[in-house]
Image: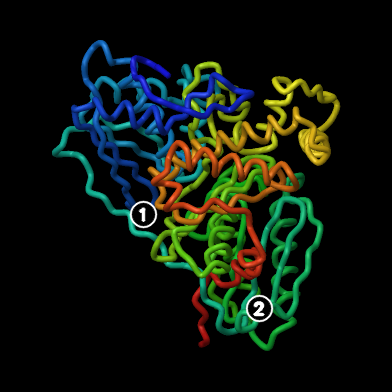
Amino acid sequence: MNYLGISFDVKNMPELDPDFIPFGPWMDAYLKGAKQPISIAVERDHGKITVRHACIYGTPDMAEADFRFVERYVKFLLWSIGGFRVYICGASHIAKELQRQYVYFENGEGENGKRWFDVQFMSDVFENGFEIVDCGQEDFPIENDDSVSVGGHLEGCRIGFDAGGSDRKVSAVVDGKTVYSEEVVWHPKTVSDPQYHYDEIVSAFRTAASKMPRVDGIGVSTAGVLIGNAPMVSSLFIQVPREKTVRKLVHTIFDRAAAEIGDGTVPIVVANDGDVTALAGAMGLGATAVMGIAMGTSEAAGYVDRKGNVLGWFNELAFAPVDLSESAMEDEWSFDIGVGCKYFSQDAVIKLAPAAGIALDEAMTPAEKLKAVQELMEQDDPRAVKIFRSIGCYLGHTMDLYSRFYDVEHMIVLGRVMSGKGGDTILAECNRVLAEEYPQLAKKMVVMLPDEKTRRVGQSVAAASLPEARHA
């Protein structure tokens, strides 16, 4: 294959998407000939800074390839790590073009850039103006990027709360054993008054607390992007107005709810549900360097490093690029193309259905469309087989990409898309592509469905383990 003057070899292509250009192999080939050093740093909350070093060509004939590499690399860093400031050293012309793309004006005050969604999202999360900084070596920041030690604490009496989009789950856990658990239907995505969310959370906490002699810690698993315990952007609060006074009620909601329990000083830790899923897998496997990817309505991801810690990163890989093809499908939320949500979610199944010759009723919901294709798969329909095989090929190539940003030995793949024969086909094709294209990575990384060993630690139990208990 050849893209922007860079030739690279790919033996396996998704049969329903022959235009797919996997970012990882192209990056490898690009970097082999690049010699001009470039440094990129991403700054997020509390002065945390992640630094990456690479090279570009720096010649006029490779200007397009240079920009494509840096632009996609920065995009991946932003959505894997998160940040409100990006420093670029060694490529001033590229930094200036990125400055033109990463612009957002509210209320029609100016012309938004190509990446206005990213700017708005990062600004909302960090409550800080987003910027791309073109800097020299003397002004380039020093890395400050320690992981955060949370989870794995099972001693004492704990509450584990899993804030799902359609039901909320809570467990009372004593010395690692669940003594009570319940699931309650709620409607967080359709209610605009955060008092509703608060009352529901407090009710769950109190129910679990009533089943134990005391509460030594509370752990929460929730969708969204967090700064500390504060959900800065979350689909659970999508209807809540953006006014600062109202949003403050959202940002403090879990801490305020914890203050209602016991004497009001019970420690609480809130974590992204993707990280808690990875933590549950790590606890179940008794392993570290664990990544989890859930393929459902979108793509969700979480990661536990070799120390058994979470990084405090976004891990919003639904918006991180995986495909460089100019004809890739656009994500209707971020308005970018080639990003993970269109490859590792129900959208991927729906996207590939026409190429497979499967006509889906447009009146059906996305979930219903997925179910229809899965029913064909259970009947071994060859058209459906091609869809899940193509997703498996996507996944195999993308494992190579993710491994450049995350040190992974155990990759757990779950979610509605992975259920039934379709999931088995995705997994088999992924492992075949890994073995043929990336044999060294295949020796290091195990890609697996959650088995009984990894399921034995549920989401709410893993959440309960997040805080250190105040009583041993």
Secondary structure under tag 1 reads helix
Can residue 192 be seen in this snapshot? no
Secondary structure under tag 2 reads strand
Closer to us: 47 or 389:
389
Q: Residue furthest top?
A: 61
Dividing the picture into quadrants, the one containing residue 28 is top left
Q: Residue furthest left?
A: 138
Q: Are marks 1 and 2 in contact (CB under 8 Å)?
A: no
Q: Residue at x 48, y 24 (%)?
A: 21
User: Residue 48 placed where, x, y %?
Assistant: 34, 52
Q: Is residue 71 left or right of residue 154?
A: left
How many numbered badges does the structure rendering display? 2
Neighbour tally class for label 2: few under 14, some 14-19, many 20 plus, Cα within 10 Å: many
Dividing the picture into quadrants, the one containing residue 41 is top left
Residue annotated with mark 1: 46
Q: Is residue 364 left or right of residue 163?
A: right
Q: CA distance from mark 1 to mark 2?
A: 32 Å
Q: Residue at x 34, y 19 (%)?
A: 6
Q: Is residue 12 above or below residue 402?
A: above
Can residue 37 be seen in this snapshot? yes
Task: Identify the colour scheme used.
Answer: rainbow
Query: Quick one: label 1 or label 2, which is nearer the N terminus?
Result: 1
Frontmost of labels 1 and 2 is 2
Q: Which mark is residue 302?
A: none
Query: Callout 1, which amino acid?
Result: His
Residue annotated with mark 2: 173
Q: Is residue 285 above or below residue 407?
A: below
User: Residue 402 placed where, x, y %?
Assistant: 45, 43
Query: Callout 2, which amino acid?
Result: Val
User: Residue 447 placed where, x, y %?
Assistant: 54, 51
